[in-house]
Image (cartoon, helix red, strand yellow):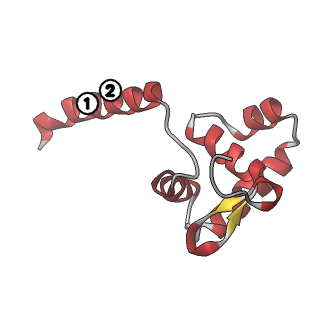
Amino acid sequence: MDGPQFPHDERPAADGEQLSRQERKCLQLYLNGLKDADIARKLSLSIHTVRMHLTRARHRLHAQSRVEAVAKALRSGIIHASFLLLLNLLFSMGTILDEISPLI
């Protein structure tokens, strides 16, 4: 065994609450830049179900927004950023900083 087993493949979330496997998958795909419709297509779910999973994850993580939910899930290890995503974010931030630095 690779560690503690949780019923129904669930892992502890913030404050001891649980995120389902589908909630984690939806958050992970949202982090990867997919829109609700794309997540629904990829997971063979309805867009309504995807929105429900993202909303439940946000509430269970006590987040005010999807972005905050993703940040909390990243910090707690519930989801993971890929190396390419991190490079893309760093490049985007560098580009933004280059554009606004003359204004500062």
In screen coordinates, is 85 left or right of 65?
A: left
Along the line of sight, the residue nearer the viewer: 77 or 72: 77
Count of numbered badges drawn on the protein: 2
- Could you classify mark 2 by the number of other residues whose Cα lies within 10 Å: few (under 14), some (14-19), or many (20 or more)? few
In screen coordinates, is 41 left or right of 101?
A: right
In this rendering, the answer to whether 76 lies above or below 16 is above
Q: Residue at x 54, y 55 (%)?
A: 73
Question: Residue 32 appears at what percent x and percent y?
Answer: 57, 34
Amino acid identity at mark 1? Gly
Residue 94, disc: 1
Question: Residue 75 appears at what percent x and percent y?
Answer: 45, 55
Along the line of sight, the residue nearer the viewer: 6 or 32: 6
Question: Residue 23 appears at what percent x and percent y?
Answer: 73, 52
Residue denoted by label 2: 91
Q: Are marks 2 and 1 in contact (CB under 8 Å)?
A: yes
Question: Residue 93 appears at what percent x and percent y?
Answer: 30, 35
Amino acid identity at mark 2? Phe
In screen coordinates, is 104 left or right of 87?
A: left
Q: Choose top left, top right, bottom left or bottom right for residue 19.
A: bottom right
- Could you classify mark 1 by the number of other residues whose Cα lies within 10 Å: few (under 14), some (14-19), or many (20 or more)? few
Label 2's element?
helix
Q: Residue at x 48, y 54 (%)?
A: 71
The quarter of the rendered structure image containing the C terminus is top left
Label 1's element?
helix
Q: Residue furthest front?
A: 1
State how far apart marks 2 and 1 are (Cα).
Answer: 5 Å
